[in-house]
């Protein structure tokens, strides 16, 4: 089950009220640095941007593929462990703006996790150490350590035997 905190809104949908929850300047600054990181081929520079500018927690030797899109408004809610690979064009969200509410949730990605290209990680999800996410998946619930999952809806594809 995803761990998100819900914030009800009245009036126009929650996205129209975005700047009541986050500074527009934070959004613009984060957007610019995220775009730089998305196209940057140097992994150490990407990780420095994620850690030092955006406030993400990123473990040693973690690799973000080209075009990865992290949450623009709440990147500080994202943690990625060491030696993980986040595949090409993956999106990692820590927020959802809906009609009558918005939701925030920490995203925790463990050590030595492999996330396939074009996946989407939703807010409030924990992906355990050693898990593998198949390309094109929508991760809408927690993934246990060592699991191989994929699809939309997300399904267990294989269990890894303990090493």
Image (tube, rainbow, N blue to C red):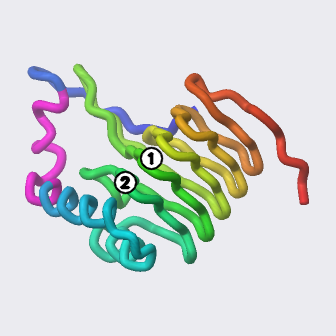
Q: Position of residue 104 (x, y in %)?
A: 36, 42
Horizontally, residue 131 falls left or right of residue 49, namely right
Does residue 70 lie above or below 12 as drawn? below
Residue sitting at 27 percent across and 60 percent down? 34
Residue sitting at 32 percent across and 34 percent down? 96
Classified by dominant secondary structure, the portion drawn in magenta counts as: helix
Residue sitting at 33 percent across and 69 percent down? 40
Q: Which residue is mark 1?
A: 90
Q: Position of residue 91 (x, y in %)?
A: 41, 45
Q: Which residue is mark 2?
A: 67
Q: Are marks 2 and 1 in contact (CB under 8 Å)?
A: no
Q: Which residues are magenta?
A: 14-27
Q: Could you say whether the residue bearing mark 1 is in a helix, strand or loop?
A: loop
Quarter of the image for the N terminus: give it.
top right
Quadrant of res 141: top right
Residue 121 in view here: no
- Mark 2 or mark 1: name the one nearer the start of the chain: 2
**Is 20 in the magenta?**
yes
Disc 2 crowd rating (10 Å Cα; few below 14, some 14-19, many 20+) is many
Quadrant of res 155: top right
Does residue 11 lie above or below 115 as drawn? above
Q: Position of residue 29 (x, y in %)?
A: 15, 63
Residue sitting at 61 percent across and 48 percent down? 127
The tally of labels here is: 2
**Is 78 in the magenta?**
no
Disc 1 crowd rating (10 Å Cα; few below 14, some 14-19, many 20+) is many
Tell me, for residue 73, which label it has, or none: none
Q: Could you say whether the residue bearing mark 2 is in a helix, strand or loop?
A: loop
Horizontally, residue 19 falls left or right of residue 129, namely left
Cα–Cα gap, marks 2 and 1: 7 Å
Quarter of the image for the C terminus: give it.
bottom right
């Amino acid at each position: 089950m995803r761990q998100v905190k819900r914030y009800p809104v009245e009036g126009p949908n929650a996205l129209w009220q975005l700047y009541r929850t986050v500074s527009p300047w934070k959004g613009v600054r984060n957007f610019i640095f995220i775009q730089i990181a998305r196209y940057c081929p140097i992994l150490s520079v990407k990780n420095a941007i994620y850690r030092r500018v955006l406030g993400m927690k990123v473990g040693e030797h973690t690799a973000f593929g080209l075009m990865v899109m992290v949450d623009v408004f709440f990147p500080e809610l994202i943690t990625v462990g060491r030696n993980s690979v986040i595949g090409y064009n993956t999106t990692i969200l820590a927020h959802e703006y809906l009609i009558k509410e918005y939701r925030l949730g920490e995203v925790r990605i463990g050590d030595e996790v492999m996330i396939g290209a074009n996946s989407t990680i939703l807010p409030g999800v924990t992906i355990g150490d050693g898990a593998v996410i198949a390309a094109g998946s929508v991760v809408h619930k927690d993934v246990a350590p060592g699991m191989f999952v994929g699809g939309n809806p997300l399904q267990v594809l294989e269990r890894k035997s303990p090493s």
